Image (tube, rainbow, N blue to C red):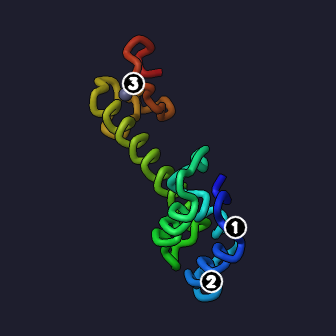
Amino acid sequence: MVCDGVSVRWLAGIIRGSRLLAEWHWTWNDLADLIHGVPERPHLPRYIHNPRGWIKARFKRSTGVLPPSKLKIIRQLDSGERARQADGAAKRAAIDHCPLCDEHGWLDTGPTAPDVRCNHDPETGGW
Ligand SMILES: [Zn+2]
């Protein structure tokens, strides 16, 4: 429990001192997320030995311009971009190693046939 040994008055003092609400316009949800470890920790540890120390450390880590709500969005964009890059690299490698298609992944089906995307499977001839 984060609240063991943490009084409302003490916590209110920390929050006021951080000026995250007044100066940086964080929401109460941002503050709750910050205290709970978002976004680095998806779940609050079950047991926190020193709740006051934990909370102080969390506030010390905070960056006014980057409330947890924004950090979450940035993380999502990052992981989406990494997934896209990995996907693109895998497609590139498949095309580079495929003897059936051209450098853009198209099968040569002759001048009258429609363009066909290669599946890079020699057993099916790319179809
Ligand atoms: Zn291919």
Residue located farthest toward the front when viewing the structure as drawn: 5
**Picture layout, residue 113 above or below residue 15:** above
**Picture layout, residue 101 above or below residue 92:** above
Q: Quadrant of residue 94?
A: top left
> Which type of secondary structure does the marked residue at label 3 adopt?
loop
Quick check: can you spot residue 21?
A: yes
Report the residue marked by disc 2.
16
Q: Residue at x 51, y 78 (%)?
A: 65
Q: Position of residue 116 (x, y in %)?
A: 48, 31
Label 3 amino acid? His
Q: Residue at x 52, y 79 (%)?
A: 64
Asked whether the beta carbons under mark 3 and mark 2 sit within 8 Å of each other, the answer is no
Specify whether tag 3 is near ligand 1 (CB below 8 Å): yes
Dot 2 crowding, Cα within 10 Å, few <14, some 14–19, many 20+: few
Spatial CA distance of label 3 from label 2 is 61 Å
Q: Nearer the viewer, residue 57 or 29?
A: 57
> Which type of secondary structure does the marked residue at label 1 adopt?
helix
**Picture layout, residue 116 above or below residue 69:** above
Specify whether tag 2 is near ligand 1 (CB below 8 Å): no
Report the residue marked by disc 3.
120
Specify whether tag 1 is near ligand 1 (CB below 8 Å): no
Q: Nearer the viewer, residue 115 or 15?
A: 15
Dot 3 crowding, Cα within 10 Å, few <14, some 14–19, many 20+: many
Asked whether the beta carbons under mark 3 and mark 1 sit within 8 Å of each other, the answer is no
Residue 29's mark?
1
Q: Quadrant of residue 96?
A: top left
Q: Position of residue 85 (x, y in %)?
A: 40, 47
Q: Nearer the viewer, residue 29 or 112?
A: 29
Spatial CA distance of label 3 from label 1 is 49 Å
Q: Residue at x 51, y 33 (%)?
A: 114
Spatial CA distance of label 1 from label 2 is 15 Å
Dot 1 crowding, Cα within 10 Å, few <14, some 14–19, many 20+: few
